Amino acid sequence: CVALGEEEYKEVLLCCARWHDTGKAHFIFANAVLGSAREGDSPLPQGLMAKPMRKMPPYERRGFRHELASALLWLAHGSMKEKDLIAYLIASHHGKVRLAIRSIPGETEPPEPGRRFARGIWEGDKLPIITIPEAGDIPETSLSLEVMEVGDGDMGESWSTRAQRLLRCFGPFRLAWYEALLCIADRRASAKEREDVNAL
C-alpha cells in the first residue's frame, strides 16, 4: 500500500487480510483438510487454516466458498467505518462472489425446505470461536444469509444494495484494484509460508 500510494486504505486492506480466511474455520473446509471435523469443532491450526500444504479432496458440499463465510462473519462482528467495503473485498478475493450472493446450479442443497443457501453456506451454519490478530476472540457465530434477500432486514441493507453503492462510490476499476492488492498480499504470504516450511 505504501509503495503504491494507497496509504489511505491501508487499514482497510489490513483488516481484510486479517479476516479474509476466517471462513476456513467452517467445518466443511476443516473436513476437507482433516477429514473428521464437525460443526462447532475448534478451528484449524492457523497454518492449516491459511493454506493447506497438500491437495485437498472435494468439499462435501458442492460449491462451498470459504470467503462467503468469512464475509458473513465480518458483517456479524466487524466494526470499522468501511464495513461494506471490507465485506465486499473479503468475499471477492477469489473472484467468485462480488455484486450478488446467490445459489448456483448443482450446489448441494440443505434438506430443510426454505432454508437459505448459497455457495455451500447454509443458513445457521456455525463457526467456532476464532482468534484474529488485532481483533481478539470472535465468539461462536451462526451465519445468516439474510443479506442475499431483496430489501432491508435485521442485518440492514441487502448485499446487492451495499455492493451497488460501492460500485457507484469507487467504480469498477478501483474496486478491482483493491481486490488485486489483497490477492497479491495473500499470494506473497502463501509463498513465504511455503518457503518457511521447505526450509525446515
Image: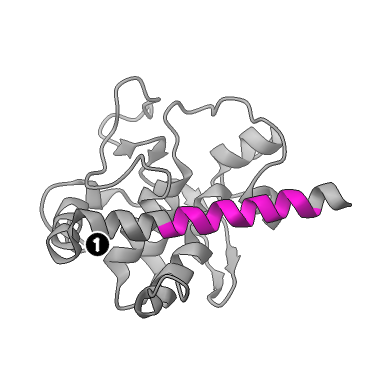
For the view shown, which residue lies furthest in the top direction? Answer: 106
Q: Which residue corresponds to mark 1? A: 155
Where residue 113 sits in the image (x, y, percent)? Answer: 28, 29
Here the colouring is one colour
Q: Is residue 25 magenta?
A: no
Q: Residues within 10 Å of mark 1 (few under 14, many from 20)?
A: few
- In the picture, measured across the screen, residue 19 lies left or right of residue 101, that is right
Main secondary structure found in the magenta portion: helix
Where residue 84 sits in the image (x, y, percent)? Answer: 27, 65
- In the picture, measured across the screen, residue 4 lies left or right of residue 198, that is left
Determine if residue 71 is in view: no
Q: Quadrant of residue 133?
A: bottom right
Residue at the image position 35 percent from the left and 61 percent from the top: 178
The amino acid at mark 1 is: Met
Seen in the picture, residue 117 relative to 154 is either above or below; the reply is: above
- In the picture, measured across the screen, residue 140 lies left or right of residue 71, that is right
Q: Quadrant of residue 131?
A: bottom right
Determine if residue 40 is in view: yes
Q: For the image shown, how many numbered marks are present on the structure?
A: 1
Q: Nearer the viewer, residue 41 or 25?
A: 25
Read off the magenta span. 181-196
Residue at the image position 54 percent from the left and 46 percent from the top: 26
Where residue 55 sits in the image (x, y, percent)? Answer: 67, 30
